[in-house]
Amino acid sequence: MNTGKTFGIVLIVIGILMMLYTGFDYVTKKKVVDMGPVQVDKKENHFVQWSPYVGLVLLTGGIIVIVGSKKNS
């Protein structure tokens, strides 16, 4: 399997995943109070979101790379 085909397949898989899952969230913990044995932490949720069109662009790019690598072979 050549490099172009492998790169195209990776782009296609990432594109499909980005169209199915349009984001994810993660939690950070921040210290609010730290007085010896007494500690108060605050958990903050952060959401990372992208458009499904980004996944569509990656999917299309992967298909173009695979087709282009077949023409050069």
Image: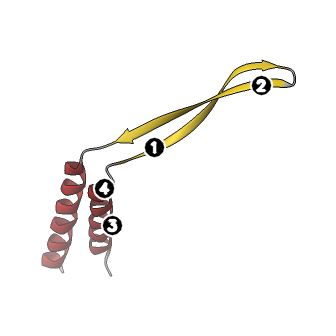
**Residue type, label 4:** Met
**CA distance separating discs 3 and 1:** 23 Å
Q: How many marks?
A: 4
**Residue type, label 3:** Val
Whichever of labels 3 and 1 marks the residue nearer the N terminus, that label is 3
The percent coordinates of residue 41 (x first, y second) are: 68, 28
**CA distance separating discs 1 and 2:** 25 Å
The percent coordinates of residue 25 (x first, y second) are: 45, 43
Whichever of labels 3 and 2 marks the residue nearer the N terminus, that label is 3
Whichever of labels 1 and 2 marks the residue nearer the N terminus, that label is 1
Residues at discs 3 and 4 in contact (Cβ within 8 Å): no
- Left or right for 73, reference 39: left
Q: Which residue is mark 2?
A: 39
Residue, x 19% and y 56% (percent of image)? 56
Q: Is residue 8 above or below residue 20?
A: below
* Viewer-side residue, 33 vs 11: 33
